[in-house]
Image: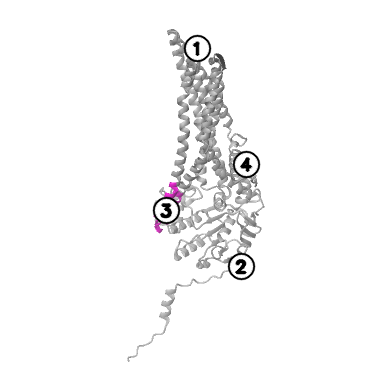
Amino acid sequence: MSDAKIDPKSVDGPKPNGAEKSRRKESTVEGTPPPDVIESDPQLTAEEAEQARKKFLLKRFWISARGYWGRGGDRFAWPCSLGLLTLIVVNVGFQYGINIWNRAIFDAIEQYNARTVYFLSAVFLPLVLGSIVLVTTQVALRMAIQRRWRSWLTTAVIARWLANGRYYQLNLIGGDHKNPEARIAEDLRIATESPVDFIAGVTSAFLSASTFIVVLWTIGGALHLTIAGSTVTVPGFLVITAVLYAAITSSSMAVIGRHFVRVSEVKNQAEAEFRYTLTHVRENGESIALLGGEEEERNDLHEKFTNALRQWALLARQHMRTTLVSQGSSLFAPVVPVLLCAPKFLEGSMTLGQLMQAASAFAIVQSAFGWLVDNYPRLADWNACARRVASLMMSLDGLERAEQSNALGRIQRGETEGNVMLSLNDLSVSLDDGTAVVKETQVAIEPGERVLVAGESGTGKSTLVRAIAGLWPWGDGSVSFHADKQLFMLPQRPYIPSGTLRRAVAYPGAADSWTLDKIKAALDKVGLDYLTDKIEEDAPWDQTLSGGEKQRLAFARLLLHNPDIIVLDEATSALDEKSQDRMMEMLIRELPKVTIISVAHRAELEAFHSRKITLERREGGAKLVSDVDLVRHKRKRNLLSRIVDNRRSLPKVSKTPR
């Protein structure tokens, strides 16, 4: 959990609360609320259940993705789509024009008609230029749709992912949503690019096949074969041959590539796991280096990379098989119509122009019918990516339903009465499966109080902090804040964003919200004055600063934001005892009216708090066992100092000679 400045009313206020606002925005963006959970039929076999799950994942993807063309979608979605369809139709018309030109030019050559050849040569240039312009415009419009669709859907998914701390809660629940960043960045890109290509390709293929089948039927006519003295007539023999040829290649591709989807899906998962491991090593480089864990990390990376290569090898085999069919089909397609039409040409019933027109039309029809052959690998890749995106969507659906449903219980959020800054009213905190972590906590905190929450590890102190911040929705009871007061969270590991040191100090506010003098003053008060000369330096501060420096920087943020309520979750754990004392003294001196809630193990922190709440682990969840006021007292000196003082206070004994 990163440092965060929170308006308690905006987290989940009563009219309306933040979650309701977020859900309203999501419904507007995606256009359709998430579907209900569909329980699998217990009578299905494991394989049938898996197939049903995969079908539902694709359905879940389209429920959100089709919203791009809905009321809450992009206003340019339909104009661009209709424009692309128009360009495809016009381009097929140009293809037909070029096909007619082929017949005319070869007929003119066969007849030695120079005038017609020259005329057709002049006509060819506008045809080619028109076709080039159409195809280029078509590509530009198609990619514009892909780009805008990806932008719209990515924005929608990120909005849901970031809403109400779900990006954090995903780490706490089960489900198929590992590596959400890879699903949003890479899988979603493929999931939105490929359908546009597919629809445009299928539309173009259908129109081309429909147009040039008529051409083949008209030109080819019937084929007369003499078999054993009998004449057999085959009407539209070129059309029948094109259909049979395409059926053979397509069915061959379907049989050979039947495992393509599964292999591609496993490969994508293996690649995502390898990327995640690399990112994990980079983010934890200091700890790994200090522990000397390079060899173990190398073995882990080698294992993940070997698995990725293994899946690539399996996918390569699938590509080899499909390429065998695709390449063979592309080599045979131009020759087949020439061989079929050769007898008619040789007997004089077909001109050279008709022969070349038939060959061109056959190639176009075959290309249209063979569209699946050429795009099956991409279709398989799209299936895998769309399902991975849908798996993330379903996990977000589950969190959203948990926010809306009272089946597991939901912590209510509201406003306090009177001068109370924060109150926990019969608050219980549970896991997403209903297991209680903290039970029946009743606390009211007055303005200016400094409350220390203590208890042994595992009693749910940090979970209680997350519930206060609104990051943990499951439980019962309520958390109430004083109206119009701001809450600022300081976790044990402060978040340091990329960019300048100035941005890091100002976070989560904008870097230019405070003057340089104010930021330098804040750094000076927390003991980071030696960094003021580097305040505009853009550097990897997350890797450069030590743990203690990061915690000092987090306290500098407090001075800039000046919140009303501060929650410190082990926020001084990386500081030594003297530095911790100076930091707490500075905080109390600079923000004397602020309300502080501290979660910590160090007993020394009691000196800076006016009240102590103790949680104790019990069966069925931790409970608040004591709530006492702390009396100010002098700090105990360390053992060495006491021993020295005791020796000085002992009476001197004179030495007596023996």
Of all residues, the one furthest to the bottom in this rendering is: 658
> Which label sits on residue 625?
2
The amino acid type found where label 4 is placed reads Ser
**Cα–Cα span, label 2 and label 4:** 44 Å
First of labels 2, 4 by sequence position: 4
**Cα–Cα span, label 1 and label 3:** 72 Å
**Cα–Cα span, label 3 and label 2:** 44 Å
Q: Are marks 3 and 2 in contact (CB under 8 Å)?
A: no
First of labels 4, 1 by sequence position: 4
> Which label sits on residue 350?
1
Looking at the image, residue 421 sits to the left or right of residue 178; the answer is: right
- The residue stretch that appears in magenta: 277-306
Dot 3: few (<14), some (14–19), or many (≥20) neighbours within 10 Å?
some
Q: Position of residue 557 (x, y in %)?
A: 49, 54
> Which label sits on residue 297?
3
How many marks overall?
Answer: 4
Q: Position of residue 42 (x, y in %)?
A: 65, 47
Of all residues, the one furthest to the left in this rendering is: 657
Query: Residue 278 in magenta?
Result: yes
> Which label sits on residue 27?
4
